[in-house]
Amino acid sequence: MKQFIREDLQNIKPYSSARDEFSGEAAIWLDANENSLVTEYNRYPDPLQRKLKAKVAEIKSINVENLFIGNGSDEVLDLLLRLICKPFQDTIAFFDPSYGMYEVLARINGLSIKRIPLNEQFEPDWSKLVELITGTRVFIICNPNNPTGNLFSREEIGSVLRAYEGVVIIDEAYIDFNDQPSMSELINDFPNLIVVQTLSKAYGMAGLRVGMAIANVEWISALNTIKPPYNVSSLVQETALALLDSTDWKTIIPTIISERKRVSEVLKKQIGVLEVFPSEANFILFRVADVNKLYRYLADAGVVVRNRSTQTNCADTLRVTIGTEAENNRFLTLLKQFYNDEAKSIIY
Ligand SMILES: Cc1ncc(COP(=O)(O)O)c(C=O)c1O
């Protein structure tokens, strides 16, 4: 696995914080230049987020040694690219369309980009994929994909993992909204596999910024050597832990999934909606007549969706996130009103 790490970072000595150098109990802490005159949040957080990690590992049914936590999965992806790729030399590959941050992170890290086109149903040509990504250092697969909502086949991804000489990062931000097991099951079979997940979506903590990498222990230790020492604040660690303990995820996630199914069925019957793409995530991409006018109409009525029309193969599409039942109903009612009004204006 060491061959996947940037050569100049392979033997880097990590920053050693006060909390790394002394981790036992003490009556008086005078080692980290903190402010003892203040009593709340005056101490640096646990750099390795041990309590939060134990809970996340339990929920995700993984070993705690295979878990790295970052300030949102955007930070985790950034650290991974920095760890693996040589600036101004390496190229990363990802599907087009996919999550827009991959391009931004490539640019920030001085990396070239290879876009792998998806067809009109948002599938790649799997038979040519390995050939297309050969020579790139990292291949990021967003599964399920954003903004399209579709899941890629585990078998096809498995073939890529076996044949590709670079690192495969699978971004599973939306994996909890479907029945497909996480590819994190395979981290000890493939040294070139890293799975990235987040508490921002199914676990509703986008505001807290908790993302994670799930990988073999060597990857976790490499990430720990390059991360900012206190990348997840005490407040976030405590709050995320309390929410994971107290929220009824077993009800919330299935409710979002059943709302997605309902909204999708209503959309399919709506005049003016030309295509509804199957979704395994907490959003639906759909194609409509008069996309810009509809977008404005919804926004003027206070309902903001995402116009994805400029993305490859996404002409005339909107992406709607699944909200509460009442929010979804308001969105569907406005959509109906819009096309009823449009129809009237054509007739008279
Ligand atoms: C595919 C994908 N990956 C990662 C992220 C970022 O998640 P986080 O909030 O953990 O940074 C998003 C957010 O929209 C996303 O859609």
Image (tube, helix red, strand yellow):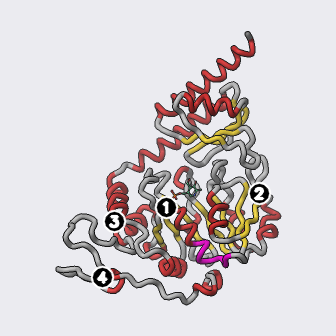
In the picture, the disc for residue 126 is none
Tell me: residue 112, above or below residue 198. below
Residue 6 is inside the magenta segment: no
Q: Which residue is mark 3?
A: 234
Q: Which residues are magenta?
A: 80-87
| Kind of residue at disc 1 | Gly
* Secondary structure at numbered mark 4: loop
| Kind of residue at disc 2 | Pro
Identified at 46% across, 57% down, the residue is 199
Q: Which residue is mark 4?
A: 23
Q: Which residue is mark 1?
A: 72
Q: Which residue is mark 2?
A: 124
Ligand 1 within 8 Å of the CB at mark 4 = no
What is the magenta segment's predominant secondary structure? helix
Give whichever of discs 3 and 1 has the lower sequence position: 1
Q: Position of residue 182 (x, y in %)?
A: 56, 62
Q: Position of residue 74 (x, y in %)?
A: 54, 62
* Secondary structure at numbered mark 1: helix
Ligand 1 within 8 Å of the CB at mark 2 = no
Work out which quarter of the rendered image holds the C terminus and state it.
top right
State the CA–CA distance, disc 1 to disc 2: 28 Å
| Kind of residue at disc 4 | Ser
Q: Quadrant of residue 264?
A: top right
Give whichever of discs 2 and 4 has the lower sequence position: 4
Identified at 36% across, 50% down, the residue is 247
State the CA–CA distance, disc 2 to disc 4: 49 Å
